[in-house]
Image (spheres, rainbow, N blue to C red):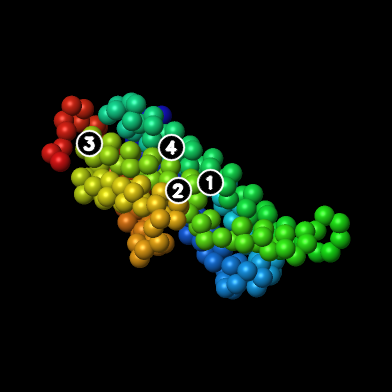
Amino acid sequence: MTRDTNARIAGFTYLFYAAIGICSEVLMHQARGVDGGAAELARIGQYATNIRLTIVITLLECLCALVLGVTLYGITRAEDHELAMLGLVCRVAEGVLGSLNNIPAYLGLLWLAKAGVGTGVPDIPTSNALRAFLLMPGTSVPLGAFFFAVGSLIFSYLLLRGRMVPVSIAWLGVFAFGLLVVVLPLQLAGFYTGPLTGYYLWLPALVFQVVLALWLLIKGVATPSIGLRPSF
């Protein structure tokens, strides 16, 4: 595919990825709207359709990650082939890990919420332990998010270095994903639970993706300025 075709596909995929990600958050928030383990699990049973739709969305998110990895690699490989390949690998890891981590957890929640009496049904202590594990706060920071941040940081840097998009847009990406690369491992390991978490942490990345997507759809990308490096 040509660079312009890659840019258009990447732009559309960015917007689609953001839209279905927001839908997934809304569906899960509705399904987990009650505080407290037993009440939350009961609500999940009532909103099983939301969980099933989230599983479908998770598969689409995996596909989006793969498409973005391939198209952004096609756009940036002329600037630095090895870095672009690393970015591609990270985006692939993002998609695969996102599916492997989230889908079994969602299926487990559905099974646990719908479990009745009879053979094969866990006893109360086991159910409580499973519920606590599947709903523990750490699951809000999926492992694939780190590879998403690393891959996106690499591609943002290559777009900046090659002057393929406006410098202000590329710098926003470097800042947004650099922040995520630093904070996400600490948050995942439980070292950081400060105010810069949740939606505040992800807002710069969301703004960057929407702005970049619109630019790629409307303007495309410039030919990389190989050998010309910005002053940092």
Q: Secondary structure at mark 4?
A: helix
Q: In the rendered structure, are the residues bearing label 1 and label 2 in contact, judged by CB atoms less than 8 Å apart?
A: yes
Q: Earlier in the sequence, mark 3 or mark 4?
A: 4
Q: CA distance from mark 2 to mark 4?
A: 10 Å
- Marking on residue 90: 4
Q: Which residue is mark 3?
A: 161
- Quadrant of the drawing holding the N terminus: top left
Residue 3 in sight from this viewpoint: no
Q: Nearer the viewer, mark 1 or mark 3?
A: 1
Q: In the rendered structure, are the residues bearing label 2 and label 4 in contact, judged by CB atoms less than 8 Å apart?
A: no
Q: In the rendered structure, are the residues bearing label 1 and label 4 in contact, judged by CB atoms less than 8 Å apart?
A: no
Q: Earlier in the sequence, mark 2 or mark 3?
A: 2
Q: Which residue is mark 1?
A: 98
User: Which residue type does callout 2 highlight?
Assistant: Ala
- Marking on residue 70: none
**Residue 148, how many percent across, how many down?**
42, 44
Residue at coordinates 84% horizontally, 64% vertically from top-left? 117
Q: CA distance from mark 1 to mark 3?
A: 29 Å
Q: CA distance from mark 1 to mark 4?
A: 12 Å
Q: Along the line of sight, which residue is nearer the eye, 183 or 47? A: 183
Q: Residues within 10 Å of mark 3 (few under 14, many from 20)?
A: many
Q: Residues within 10 Å of mark 1 (few under 14, many from 20)?
A: many
Q: Nearer the viewer, mark 3 or mark 4?
A: 4
- Marking on residue 145: 2
Q: Earlier in the sequence, mark 1 or mark 2?
A: 1
Q: CA distance from mark 2 to mark 3?
A: 24 Å
**Residue 4: quadrant of the picture:** top left
Vertical placement of residue 156 versus 127, above or below: above
Residue at coordinates 53% horizontally, 55% vertically from top-left? 139
**Residue 130, how many percent across, how many down?**
67, 58
Describe residue 99's horizontal placement relative to residue 153 as left or right. right
